[in-house]
Image (spheres, grey):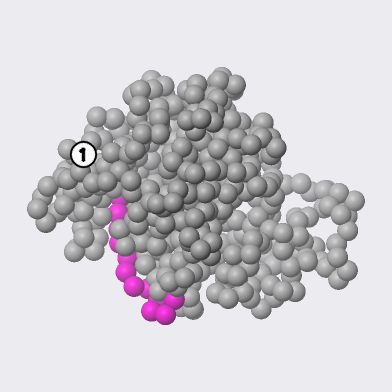
Amino acid sequence: MSTVNWRCAGLFVVGVFGALPSGAEELSAGTVIGPGNLAQRMDDSFAGHRIGDMLSEPMQMWIRDHNLTMRLAEPGDYRIPSHLIEATRANAGQARFNSETRLVEGWTAGIPFPPDQIDINDTQAGYKLAYNFFYTPAFRNDSAEFDSHTILIGANRGLEQTQKLINYQYVLQGRTSGGPLNLDEEVLKKQLVVVQHPYDVAGLGSFNIRYANGKQDNAWAYVKSVRRVRRISGNFWMDPVANLDLLGDDNGLIDASPSWYAGVKLLDIKHVLAVANTPGMVDPENFGERIDLDNPPHWNPINVDWEPREVFVLRIDYPEVHPYSYKTVYMEKEFPQNWLGEMYDKKGELWRIGLFMGIQMETENGEPAMAFSQVPVCDFQRLHCSQITVTALRLNNQELRAQDFSERNIEKVAKGQMFAF
């Protein structure tokens, strides 16, 4: 097991980071940045990094115009699971990006392109990083069971609706937590999602197969009213997710085969402020503890710390038929995890901002893991926000079986006959 040490005490000296502008300060942990002091704090620094440089223009807008506040905290440590380190070392140098097919060849397990070997001058670097997340997101757990809520919030109306759902995912390629490495030659993962509340939509469910070779997803839905499972379009990466403020590709901030994108470029390596270590899962009986439901726009995260994270800045361009023109994604430099996404419409104007708010935990087999406790995706054109909050989570459950993940079992899961959390 390895530890990434983010603390760099002793490096906060002018000689290392450069002279501060006249009148600027080095801020201390606990300082709060908000609409009332943003302009005054832009030239100040924290952990040796200028505040204005760690806030993109969309994030500055969110603070300035929509009352977001950020409580600064020292960067936290992350423990990287030994099975990921071992798989990455064992397979180093095997993965290759084919620029003609925009697919990866030779990958078996682990991070295909180790981040410390990424060259910003490599024209393929953007695609390589996107594939790192595609194959090994959030420390690459072989299974995940989420008990979560989606919360719909309007800037004028406040809290509109909550929905409870369960989400089960099972990986079939590049498995590293035990057992066979690969369980299928084509399928990367399978996913079952079922809505449990409110009553009018309870029991609706979907099943999705994601392929490793760029093939379009296969997907099915259980229609409760007719008690039938029906095939649906596998192109939902560009479709709205139910009635939420996000598209399929906004799940995890990017969630598609990189081969489907029109282009992926590595623009920069820099530090941004992100919520990487939340204090715990969200209490479903008290959403207001983590979401400022009382004050406009009623969707801002509260009681969390924002810390400097070094990131790769990616620009993802979409095909003409996709609703977005492009998306800017800020990916953790040390491992494949996205902290922030900014989505733009066909006119090139900001449409949505998504945050991934991380939490550290352990898997069922005792390895360190990272997941999320909140993912707000906010539509700044419509002034509406969807918050996905996790209330319970289990990773690498050895009792799950690949054969249980099929379209034939959506109805059973919807009726509570399988996968009781």
Residue 22 can be seen in this image: yes
Which portion, as a residue range, is magenta?
A: 155-167
Q: Which residue is mark 1?
A: 407
417 vs 153, left or right, is: left
Residue most toward the left?
Answer: 226
Kindly state the secondary structure of the residue where label 1 is placed: helix
**Amino acid residing under circle 1:** Glu
Q: Residue at x 32, y 39 (%)?
A: 217
Residue 397 in the image: x percent, y percent? 36, 35
Judging depth in this view, the residue of 132 and 410 nearest the camera is 132
Q: Residue at x 40, y 30 (%)?
A: 213
Q: Residue at x 59, y 40 (%)?
A: 126
Residue 368 in the image: x percent, y percent? 52, 38
Judging depth in this view, the residue of 81 and 65 nearest the camera is 65
78 up-or-down from 160: above or below: above
Where's the C terminus, which quadrant?
top left
256 up-or-down from 354: above or below: above
Look at the image and say whether residue 159 sits in the magenta stretch.
Answer: yes
